[in-house]
Amino acid sequence: MTMSENSRNLEAGLLLRKNQNDINECRITAVVLFSTFVSVCGSFCFGCAAGYSSVAQTGIINDLGLSVAQYSMFGSIMTFGGMIGAIFSGKVADLMGRKGTMWFAQIFCIFGWLAVAFANDSMWLDIGRLSTGFAVGLLSYVIPVYIAEITPKHVRGAFVFANQLMQSCGLSLFYVIGNFVHWRKLALIGLIPCALQVVTLFFIPESPRLLGKWGREKECRASLQHLRGDDADISEEANTIKETMILFDEGPKSRVMDLFQRRYAPSVVIGVGLMLLQQLSGSSGIMYYVGSVFDKGGFPSSIGSMILAVIMIPKAILGLILVEKMGRRPLLLMNNLFNHRPLPVECAFSAYSLSYGMLDELTPIFTCIGVVGFISSFAVGMGGLPWIIMSEIFPMNVKVSAGTLVTLANWSFSWIVAFAYNFMLEWNASGTFLIFFTICGAGIVFIYAMVPETKGKTLEDIQASLTDFLQ
C-alpha cells in the first residue's frame, strides 16, 4: 500500500468518525426528552404560583378582609422569596447537584402551597408565598442550567425554552380554573406538579458537566452515555468536558468579586442586563395582577384570563420553534421592537381615556389588546430567552457566583416591580406604561450592541469566545 493510499484511508477514517460524531450530536434520545420534562415540572410550578395571585385576588380579599396594601404584599412577597433563593441558588446547585437542588426546592414549594391553602390570616398567606418564592428562586436558576448541560447543542435553545413553555402552561391552567375553583382548593392543586417532580427526579441522570467538575470522571461518562444513547460515541464530548474542567481547576477558585475582572465583563453585563430588561418591562406586575388590570380597563377579568389561557401556550410553542430557527439575538430584537409595543401603546391610551373620559367605549378593547399582546409576546421572547442565554454564557468556574448574581438581579427587580405595580397604577396608569415602553426601547439598543448569537455552538465554544472578547 502506497503512502498516498494510507493518507487517503486516514482521511476517510477521520471523515467517517466526524460524520458519526455529527450524527451522535444530532440525536435526541428518550432520556434527554424525559429528563427535560422532569426538570420543567418545576417551571410549571413557577407558572402556577405566578398566576395564582391574579385569579385568587377577589376571593382572598373578600374571605380574609385584606386591604390593597396587604394583598400587594402577598402578591409581591413571592418575588422577595425568589430573591433570597437566588442568593443561594448557584452554591446550592453546585453542592447538592442539579437534581438535589430541585428536590430541596420542592420541600419549600410544597410547604408554601399548604400554608396558603390553610391560611386564616395574612401572616400565613405571606409565609406560604415567601416559601414558594424561595423554591422558585432556586428552580429558576437550576432548571435552565441543567437542561443546557444535558442537551445536544443543536437543540439546546429549544429545550431550555421549554422552561418558558411550561411556565406558560402553569399560568394558563390557573387563569382558567381559577375562575371556577375556590382559592384554597386552587392552592392544593398547585401541589400536583410539585409531587410529580419529586417522584420522577429518581429516574433522571445528574448533569455530566457537573460530575466532571466534581472530578467524578467515570460517573460523568456514564451519565453522558445514558443521555446520548448506548451505541453513541461520546469520547469527543467527554474529552472536551474533561479538558475544560482541567483548565478551570488550574486557575484560581471563583469568588463573586472575580466576576468583575475584565475577562468576565461581557458575560456579566449581558446576563444582568437581560434580566433587568425582562423585569423592568413590567412583566411581573402585569402577570401577578392581570385581573386588576382588566378590571381597571373595564374588561371582565374572567373573560380576559380565559383569552390569555388560550393564547399563551401556542405563543410559547412558537417561541420554542423559532429559538433554533431564528436564533436568540434576532428573536430578542424582534420581540422588543414589535411584540412589546402593544402593551405600552394601547394600555397607555386606555389609561388616558380612563383618566379624561375620552372614548370610554373603546377603553376595554384597548386594555384587552394591550395586556394580551404583551403577555403572549413576552412568552415568545423576553420571558425565556434571557434564561437560555444565562445558561450558556458563563464558564463552569464562575457559573456559581455568576448564576447567583444574575438570578438575584432578576428577582430583586421583579420584587420591586411587583410590589410597586398597584401603587403605580393608582399614581398614574398612563405614565406607568410609558415607563415600561421606554425601557423596551432601550432594550433594543442594548441587545443590538451587546448580545451575541449562541445558536449551534457548544457551551465551551461560547464561553471561550466571551472570555477572550476583551483580551
Image (tube, rainbow, N blue to C red):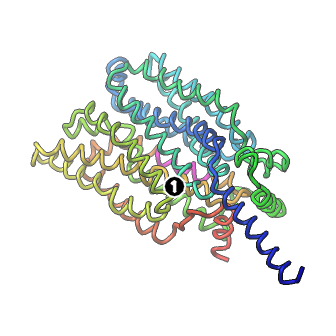
The image quarter containing residue 12 is bottom right
- Residue 328 pos. (x, y %): 50, 61
| Prevalent SS, magenta region | helix
- Residue 240 pos. (x, y %): 77, 61
The reply to whether the magenta stretch includes residue 97 is no
Specify the segment rendered in magenta.
405-414
Q: Which residue: 50% across, 58% down? A: 274
Whether residue 85 is visible, yes or no, is no
Of 411 and 370, the residue lying toward us: 370
Amino acid type of the residue that numbered disc 1 sits on in the rendered structure: Pro
Of 277 and 72, the residue lying toward us: 277
The reply to whether the magenta stretch includes residue 409 is yes
| For residue 12, side relative to residue 289 (left or right) | right
Task: Looking at this view, name the residue that lies furthest to the right.
Answer: 1
Whether residue 14 is visible, yes or no, is yes
- Looking at the picture, does residue 397 appear above or below residue 179? below
Check disc 1: other Cα within 10 Å, few if <14, some if 14-19, many if 20+: many
| For residue 58, side relative to residue 458 (left or right) | left
Residue beneath label 1, please? Answer: 386
- Residue 438 pos. (x, y %): 34, 61
